[in-house]
Amino acid sequence: MKLLSPASLGAKLLIILTAVGLAGAIAITLMLAAVITPSFNQLEAKEIDAHVDRTRAALSDYLAKAETSVRDYGDWNSSYDYMGHPNPAFERESFSPLAMTNLAVTGMAYVGNDGHIVIARWLDLAKGTDAPAMRTALIGRIRQIDFARALHGHSSAAFYTRIGPVVAAMAVAQVRRSDGSGTPRGYVLMARPLTSERLSTLLQLHALLEASSAADAPVITPHYGQMGISVPIFGIGGHAVAAVHFNVARNVSLLGQRMLLLAVAGTSVLLIIVLFVLRRMIARLVLAPLNQVERHMQGVTASGSLSPLDQAPRADEIGSLGKSFNTMLHQLKDLREQVEVQSFALGKSESAVAVMHNVRNALSPISTIISRGIGLAPPIDQAMVERAVGELAREDIPAARRQKLAAFVAAAINAEAQAREAQREQLSEGRTALQHVLEIIGTQQAAAHERPPLAPCDVGEIIAQNANIARHGSGAHIAFDYPSGSHLVLANRVILSQVVGNLFGNAAEAIAAAKKLDGAREGRITVSITSEGEATVIAIRDNGEGFAPDVAATLFQRGYSTRSHKSGGLGLHWCANSMTAMEGSLRLESEGVGCGAVALLTLKAAAVESVGLAA
């Protein structure tokens, strides 16, 4: 098989199968990606949300523990008494390094209701000593706190804040008696620092505290194999004071990618195997038999011998094709012998008969014009004119008589001039018809051997010209009704004019036959031109004798005629072939005998570009 030839069917099938395979692989990849990737992205998003929620829960738990510790100090009789009467003994006991270490706080302070600092301490737990700089930062931060806003009507609250460089969970509580009674005498504050190590312990993963800057919403930073998550730590104003950053493995995303790659690879391999097997089966079951038929046809073309195809018997479509091919070869052999016998005789007569038929139709109006001219009587009696002129030459004629004679002579001269003008018009129309005959004779020989050249032409002008000729050639009064204006079609002007002339002649004969049966009927031929997409339809309708609908197809057969006194029928046959040669069609329709007929000519409409070039 000629798979290497780009024009062969095998090469085209190979290209088609390859294109189908590539398109199928791409479509399957996109489909799997559209199904698998969003699902795993949703799972990964849920996993990220779970990490964010778990981080927020750990931060809230850390605040809750700090608030519990500060509430114990706030609702305590000793604290209540101390705020009423500060004393060193309470300060040594409650602000000792051991007490602050047990509470896991590094900063503590008592603040009066008026905002004055009763006592404040910041302890460096690692060294067990005070940190004056941090104590100053703690006092400065305390003075910035609006306790009423921080408590929101509660007795205690906790929030995250920045104390100098340290991010801490600060808890504040009102100082009351142990049973919650008594007018609050101030506030007690505790600061529990939040570090990366403590966050890592709370979250059970490696976490970093970012105290430089933080957004108010979680920030997700995807990396290959890992996902960076930053969770904001909100302060008292609802804005982030720091953020917790940690990385988690993208196990779900990696699993989705591996599943997608595996599914695409498996499907692609399966598709390749199916296409390979399909190509081999097509090559064996279809291409090989077709190649055998092609080789046999090439042998027939080269030798001219219509020998049958030698093919193994098959019960499928290829076997049926071989049988039909052999039957066709046998029929062609018989037809070849018949054509050789008939072609010579038919070729000699058909062209001459067609030319004579068209010439007869074109000469008919000339004969009518000449006959009318011969039989035309003078418009006025010549003897009377000569006598009137003789009387005018006499001098003894009265003036009244002379005026009458002069008017008579002038009228005679005018009538003679009108007669001459009418005769000149008839001779002009005869000359036009004669030129039409010469065009038919000049173009018939070229039209018989090749497809006529097509060019934009005005079918409205052709109809008007042939209608004028048909008025004189019919021998009877026929009213013509056709549209004015220009209607451009793509055709051969001379051949189209002959077709229209033949159809007008047939319509005139049908009207004449109808008038023999009904003398009161007025003959009428109506022409309409309509556009149907890229085609133009010319309808020639007459009120003649018509025909039975079942003989419409028979009218185009060579030698057929509905009139017993004629041996023609070649006109419609020639018209149909001419319309086909001009890439158009001709159709005859009638509702029955006595109902008239309509001839439908369909031609291509001339494009604007073609009209411009023709102009």
Image (cartoon, rainbow, N blue to C red):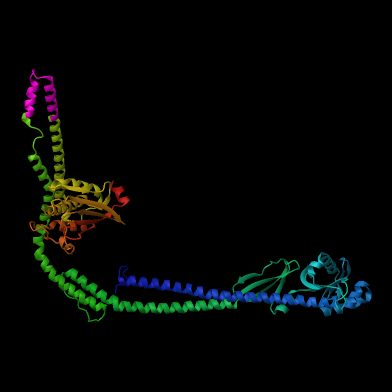
Q: Residue furthest top?
A: 396
Q: Residue at x 81, y 77 (%)?
A: 69
Front residue of 177 and 543: 543
> Magenta residues?
384-411
Tell me if 585 is positioned left or right of 36 in this view. Answer: left
Estimate the x, y position of residue 25 in percent, counting from the top left: 44, 74
Q: Is residue 580 above or below residue 273?
A: above
Number of disc labels: 0
Estimate the x, y position of residue 380 in percent, counting from the top left: 9, 33
Tell me if 516 is positioned left or right of 21 in this view. Answer: left
Estimate the x, y position of residue 202 in percent, counting from the top left: 72, 78
- Can the viewer see residue 165? no
Question: Which of the 4 image quarters holds residue 98?
Answer: bottom right
The answer to whether residue 91 is magenta is no
Question: Which of the 4 image quarters holds residue 268?
Answer: bottom left
Front residue of 4 and 612: 612
Tell me if 277 is positioned left or right of 352 in this view. Answer: right
Estimate the x, y position of residue 457 in percent, counting from the top left: 25, 49
Q: Is residue 396 above or below residue 99?
A: above
Front residue of 458 and 423: 423
Q: Quadrant of the N terminus?
A: bottom left
Front residue of 434 and 125: 434
The answer to whether residue 405 is magenta is yes
- Can the viewer see residue 375? yes
Question: Which of the 4 image quarters holds residue 536?
Answer: bottom left
Q: Is residue 441 above or below residue 259?
A: above
Magenta span main SS: helix
